[in-house]
Image (spheres, grey):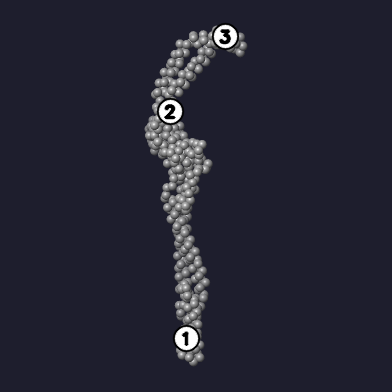
Amino acid sequence: MSPDSLPPFSAAGLRAVFHRWKYLLALAVGLATVVSAAVAWALPNIYSSTAVFLPTSPQSTDPDRLVEGSKLEIGARSEDLDRVLTIGQSLPLAELMIKRFNLYQHYNMGQPGSDVVENAVLGEFNSNLSIVHNERDAIELTFQDYDKKLAAAVANAMVAAIDSVNQQLTLENRRNVLELYRQRSAQLGRSYERTRQRLLGARRRYGVFGLEQQGRYLAKEVIETEKELRVAEGGGGGSVSGLRRALNGLIRADGGNAINLEGWTQGTDSVNLLNSRLTDIQTRYVASQGAYEQAETSLTSRVSSLYQVQKAYPATRKSKPFRTVIVLGSVLLTLALSVFFILLLELYRRPSAIIN
């Protein structure tokens, strides 16, 4: 008769089978209980420490924007969360923590230097680390170890390292921008000095010194001198030649006067143009100096790119192992396997004995 044609087991037949195997079954369950209990209680207690934080956008923590009055935005974008998760799971960060806390010795993996030891320590470290994005858009970083204080220290150090690397992503660009600010400020300073010297030269050359009423007083003096010359030429008092020389000095650039109408007329446009140019450069130079000083200050400042909701603290109770669960699971698994093999053996040896 084929196994497919066999009728189902009866309750009486099953009881008879288990009665014959009850001592061996009890022995197997008893051994499983003792061994699993011994193993479970030999396992060290593992403690978990969790740090919770929110990443912020690099733009919202830019010190330049904070100085200008922009608000710190706590809300995290998806790209900010992905960036922080990538940093936290990166190999350089793991190696930094391993060396900082000397996990080679802590995990009893041997001396560093060989690929076997490096891979073993790195694998153990990654198995104890968990960094996830929870449903509330926060990052939960958990580290497990049998040393509760070490677990908390590693978790907090990981958060600080993630913050530092997150800031370093824009630090080099900020240094380049600072150098551009410095070069622009220096260039404007040189341009300002050249324009100022040209303006002084133009004032000296044309006699335009920027006095508010200089043109009016010069024109008035020319008119009065010319009037006196006409009166002297008509027979009035005064020296005609002297007045004529004085009038030429006031009118002509080669008349000998530093301030004369011809030079003043020629130099007014040049001086006004240079003066406007100097004012424009001065305004931009002052603004560039302020931008450079602000960029230099912001570069040396340390504004955290993370908003830490909860620091990691040493756990007050273990997170694993669950010894009772281990023992019960081992017993149930042993019992199930024993029943399976007993039935399989009975079917193979005496199928007729357990058929109704």
Secondary element under disc 3, as helix, strand or loop, is loop
Q: Is residue 314 above or below residue 274?
A: above
User: Which badge, 2 or 3, comes first in the chain's sequence?
Assistant: 2
Indicate which disc residue 355 carries.
3
Q: Amino acid at mark 1?
A: Leu
Using the numbered discs, state the Cα–Cα distance from disc 2 to disc 1 in whole angstroms: 114 Å
Q: Looking at the image, which is closer to me, 179 or 269?
A: 269
Secondary element under disc 2, as helix, strand or loop, is loop
User: Which badge, 2 or 1, comes first in the chain's sequence?
Assistant: 1
Q: How many marks?
A: 3
Using the numbered discs, state the Cα–Cα distance from disc 2 to disc 3 in whole angstroms: 46 Å
Residue occupied by mark 1: 243
Q: Amino acid at mark 3?
A: Ile
Q: Residue at x 47, y 69 (%)?
A: 199
Q: Residue at x 48, y 39 (%)?
A: 138
Estimate the x, y position of residue 130 in percent, counting from the top left.
46, 34
Mark 3 burial class by Cα count in 10 Å: few <14, some 14-19, many 20+: some
Q: Is residue 351 above or below residue 220?
A: above
Task: Give the quadrant of the N terminus.
Answer: top right
Estimate the x, y position of residue 202 in percent, counting from the top left.
47, 72
| Quadrant of the image occupied by residue 292 | bottom left
Mark 2 burial class by Cα count in 10 Å: few <14, some 14-19, many 20+: some
Estimate the x, y position of residue 183 in percent, counting from the top left.
46, 57
Labels 1 & 3 near each other (Cβ < 8 A): no
**Residue extending farthest bottom:** 235
Using the numbered discs, state the Cα–Cα distance from disc 1 to disc 3 in whole angstroms: 152 Å
User: Which badge, 1 or 3, comes first in the chain's sequence?
Assistant: 1
Estimate the x, y position of residue 101 in percent, counting from the top left.
38, 36
Q: Looking at the image, which is closer to me, 202 or 36?
A: 36
Residue occupied by mark 2: 320
| Mark whose residue sits in front, 2 or 1 | 2
Q: Residue at x 50, y 66 (%)?
A: 277
